[in-house]
Image (spheres, rainbow, N blue to C red):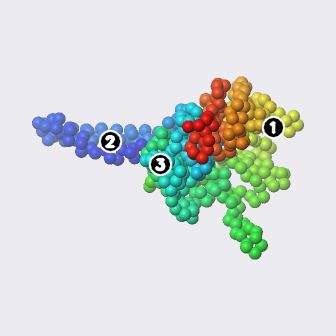
């Protein structure tokens, strides 16, 4: 894989302008002096270019996390359709009466949410025109190098034609300057169709997901069967360079076994992709957990950890290759935060967590959600606990929508992010205990929905 280099953007430097300026500056000098000065300037320009190229390599080849160029790998659960720029702005895909809607928010009440669409005069209701309704993929949202990236299908064509390619789109964070960055082959979707995770990182958009064996339908028996009995499911990773003429490459493939249930999560860090794969046999007799490390520069991969002893849940990998997860004791029903050094393969209990139905480890915290009681526990790794209540907000949503449908999306340094009403609302629950709020919702984007906070 070719890592993007800053020097690629310097190819339009015209040394002629530099030379012309040098010659005019001393037009009375003899030709020898001009030639000498020309040689010096050319050498200086070459040195500058080499230094800039070196800086480009250092930038994108760095083994360290680069805040301005890496998408934060740790604050959002991977299968949720929301992302953030890390500075208080959020972007999400919601479902509304007219289809899917891609929207942005400044983190304040949802009245200030806006459509990612720069079509002049668009009322965001016609899916043949509106860019906010162009079949966006749920998990393809990333903020990278000051722009929002997402994937969508072609607009204004039939479904079969729309499946042929994947549009990688981008815009400014205010929804302006929408661009088609490139078209990716349709197989990156068909080969990653289940549990899909799409994320931009260091100049590439990565598509990760499972491909199931092809099946055929028998109209006589009204049943389906596997076309190739020997074919097994697979977990695949494709890398699509963001440039229009960039590369397209499958960098990882994992063959599953028939008769086992698989799930995975993944995190990017610097030049590596970590993939954690969990599987169980259908009869419950064999648990397996594996961690793979994929080198994003070379595409090489290796399994760095494997175990069949631990029922690992809610895992999160920090930059120093410590894997944090929760483990519940079946006898006492108590849940503990565990830390595993995947290089040494030795798990260690870090602390006991307060009683809560569901825990996920996210962004250096263990977050417990009780959706029925409308409560959250945010546990820092030092053991301190922040208890949060969002009962008033949940009741308001239930009153307007008929149900709350709460799930955990992530936690950044300021807020816990929740998805509510399944695919229709996103909410922030501030860690400082201030008032929770809806930030993106169908009622704000679609006139067919009544607003949560009253009329026009």
Foreground residue among 148 and 233: 148
Of pointers 3 and 1, the one earlier in the residue sequence: 3
From the image, which quarter does the C terminus lie in?
Answer: top right
- The answer to whether mark 2 and mark 3 are in CB contact below 8 A is no
Place of residue 402 in the rendered image (x, y in percent of width and height, measured from the top left): 71, 42
Estimate the spatial distance between the alpha carbons at disc 3 and disc 1, rounded to whole Å. 52 Å
Instruction: Name the residue carrying label 1.
Output: 328
Where disc 2 sits, the SS reads: helix
Where disc 1 sits, the SS reads: strand
Query: Is 178 displayed left or right of 385 in the figure?
Result: left
- The answer to whether mark 1 and mark 2 are in CB contact below 8 A is no
Instruction: Name the residue carrying label 3.
Output: 122
Residue in the picture at 76% in, 70% down: 222
Instruction: Name the residue carrying label 2.
Output: 46
Place of residue 96 in the rendered image (x, y in percent of width and height, measured from the top left): 61, 48
Q: Mark 3, mark 1: which one is toward the viewer?
A: 3
Place of residue 381 in the rendered image (x, y in percent of width and height, measured from the top left): 70, 28
Residue in the picture at 69% in, 35% down: 396
The crowd level at tag 2 (other Cα within 10 Å; few <14, some 14-19, many 20+) is: few
Query: Is 75 displayed left or right of 68 in the figure?
Result: right
Foreground residue among 89 and 245: 89
């Amino acid at each position: 894989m070719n890592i993007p280099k800053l020097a690629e953007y310097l190819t339009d430097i015209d040394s002629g302008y530099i030379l012309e300026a040098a010659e005019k500056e001393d037009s009375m000098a003899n030709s020898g002096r001009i030639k000498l000065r020309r040689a010096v300037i050319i050498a200086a320009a070459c040195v500058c270019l080499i230094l800039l190229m070196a800086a480009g390599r250092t930038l994108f080849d760095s083994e360290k996390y680069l805040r301005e160029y890496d998408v934060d790998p740790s604050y959002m659960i991977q299968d949720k359709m929301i992302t953030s720029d890390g500075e208080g702005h959020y972007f999400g895909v919601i479902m509304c009466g007219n289809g899917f809607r891609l929207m942005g928010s400044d983190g304040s009440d949802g009245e200030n949410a806006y459509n990612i669409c720069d079509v002049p005069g668009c009322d965001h209701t016609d899916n043949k025109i509106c860019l906010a309704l162009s079949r966006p993929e749920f998990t393809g949202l990333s903020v990278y190098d000051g722009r929002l990236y997402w994937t969508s299908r072609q607009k204004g064509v039939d479904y079969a034609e729309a499946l042929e390619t994947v549009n990688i789109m981008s815009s400014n964070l205010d929804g302006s300057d929408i661009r088609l960055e490139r078209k990716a082959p349709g197989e990156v979707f068909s080969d990653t169709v289940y549990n899909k995770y799409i994320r931009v990182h260091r100049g590439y958009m990565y598509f990760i997901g499972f491909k199931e064996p092809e099946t055929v339908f028998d109209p006589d028996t009204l049943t389906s069967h596997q076309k190739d009995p020997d074919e097994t499911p697979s977990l695949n990773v494709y890398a699509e360079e963001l440039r229009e003429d960039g590369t397209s490459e499958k960098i990882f493939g994992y063959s599953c076994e028939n008769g086992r249930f698989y799930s995975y999560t993944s995190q990017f860090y610097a030049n590596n992709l970590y993939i954690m794969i969990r599987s169980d046999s259908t009869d419950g007799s064999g648990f397996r957990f594996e961690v793979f490390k994929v080198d994003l520069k070379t595409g090489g991969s290796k399994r760095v950890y494997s175990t069949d002893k631990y029922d690992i849940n809610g895992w999160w990998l920090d930059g120093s290759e410590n894997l944090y997860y929760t483990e519940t004791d079946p006898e006492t029903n108590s849940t503990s935060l565990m830390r595993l050094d995947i290089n040494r393969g030795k798990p260690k209990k870090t602390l006991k967590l307060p009683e809560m139905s569901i825990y996920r480890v996210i962004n250096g915290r263990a977050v417990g959600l009780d959706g029925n009681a409308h409560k959250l526990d945010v546990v820092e790794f030092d053991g301190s606990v922040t208890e949060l209540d969002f009962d008033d907000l949940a009741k308001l949503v239930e009153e307007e929508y008929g149900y709350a449908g709460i799930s955990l999306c992530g936690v950044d340094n300021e807020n816990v992010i929740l998805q509510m009403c399944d695919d229709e609302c996103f909410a922030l629950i501030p860690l400082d205990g201030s008032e929770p709020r809806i930030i993106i919702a169908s009622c704000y984007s679609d006139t067919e929905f009544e607003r949560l906070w009253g009329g026009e």
